Amino acid sequence: MLTAGTAAASGEATRLGIGLDVGGTKIAGGVVAADGRILDRALLPTPEAGDEAATVAAMRRVVDDLRARHPGVEALGVGAAGLVEWPAGRIVWAPHNAYRELPLRRLLSESTGLPTVVDNDAKAAAWAEARFGAGAGADDMILLTVGTGIGGGFVLGGEAYRGSTGLGGEVGHMIVDPQGNPCDCGNNGCLETMASGSALGRMGREAALADPAGGLASLAGGPERVTGVTVFEAALQDDPVAIELFERVGFWLGVGVASLVTMLDPQVVVIGGGLVATGELLLGPARESYQRYVFAHAHRTLPAVVPAQLGPDAGMVGAATLALRAGG
């Protein structure tokens, strides 16, 4: 994790921006230097879903709080979950908030007077990992954030890739198995339904229902109470069912990575999100299936698949430094 003491501040590195990471439960803000150092933080809960005005007002309060202590801030960047049009910064749709067609960039720019950028949170995190984290030094990097769902972001040719309107890079909704489980997006067999924390929990409940006297059900206090965390705890106790479930989830994650590497040929693939904390339980089988299914695996040097380094700060750092970059 980057802190104020991780690098010397001089010249260009002393330029300051504010980064906001807007999620379903909290708005995390930070003052970030151009070299990725976090100098200050502020946090507010996300207002009740559906209250657009309250949500924007809460973002403004975080910004005002940070600017009061750092009046030299030059730009504002926001990383938000959902479909975000680029460069307009309009949130078309967000999975865990009820706002729709929200012109967030315009609203924040007008109310703060700061040059503002608004991007998808995973894309902002990818930029941070490519500049300051596990992909530092790589001009071509793929990030997959594996948590409750799966997000992603690409840095290609040294630039953040967004597609023609900003909606590109939705790797969680890349279909890997058309006969697979239904996804909330309306399709079947999206990577998110096969390889996310939610998928792990669903598979765990299915296994516990099939064996209600088994280890998973016992650990959780009943088959219906099994979560992804339960499966992880059971795997740490060498429960064979839990380990097999991690192998299944990791298999599908590796299939997704193989497809992305075949298409984009990056220098490195970074895996972030909450599920990466399970370590080799997830990454081991993911690497195995990736190496099996990637195109021309016997005739190329494959990019490494590595865990992210910046943790939950990645979106904030990425948003702030993207804003500073856009502002010149």
Image (cartoon, grey):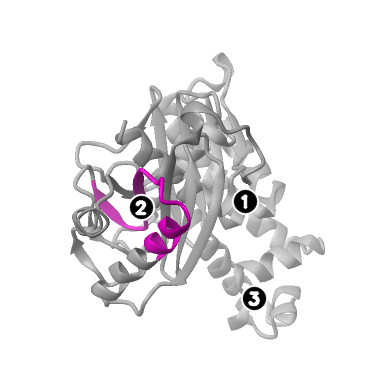
The stretch in magenta equals 62-85
Instruction: Please name whichever residue, 108 or 206, is drawn nearer the observer in this view of the structure.
Output: 108
The residues tagged by marks 1 and 2 sit, at their Cα atoms, a distance apart of 24 Å
Q: Which mark is residue 208?
A: 3
Instruction: Please name whichever residue, 37 or 25, is drawn nearer the observer in this view of the structure.
Output: 37
Residue linked to disc 1: 276
Q: Nearer the viewer, mark 2 or mark 3?
A: 2
Q: Residue at x 48, y 57 (%)?
A: 69
- The x, y position of residue 312, in whole percent, is 55, 54
Is 218 left or right of 170, judged from the image as shown?
A: right
Q: Earlier in the sequence, mark 3 or mark 1?
A: 3
The residues tagged by marks 2 and 3 sit, at their Cα atoms, a distance apart of 41 Å
- The x, y position of residue 262, in whole percent, is 43, 27
In the rendered image, the residue lying farthest to the bottom is 221
Few, some or many C-alpha atoms within 10 Å of disc 2 (few <14, some 14-19, many ≥20)? Answer: many
Looking at the rendered structure, the secondary structure element under dot 2 is: strand
Looking at the rendered structure, the secondary structure element under dot 1 is: helix
The residues tagged by marks 3 and 1 sit, at their Cα atoms, a distance apart of 23 Å
- The x, y position of residue 7, in whole percent, is 63, 34
Q: Nearer the viewer, mark 3 or mark 1?
A: 1
- The x, y position of residue 148, in whole percent, is 50, 63
In the rendered image, the residue lying farthest to the right is 237
Q: Amino acid at mark 3?
A: Ala
Q: Which mark is residue 78?
A: 2
Is 150 above or below relative to 100? above
Q: Nearer the viewer, mark 1 or mark 2?
A: 2
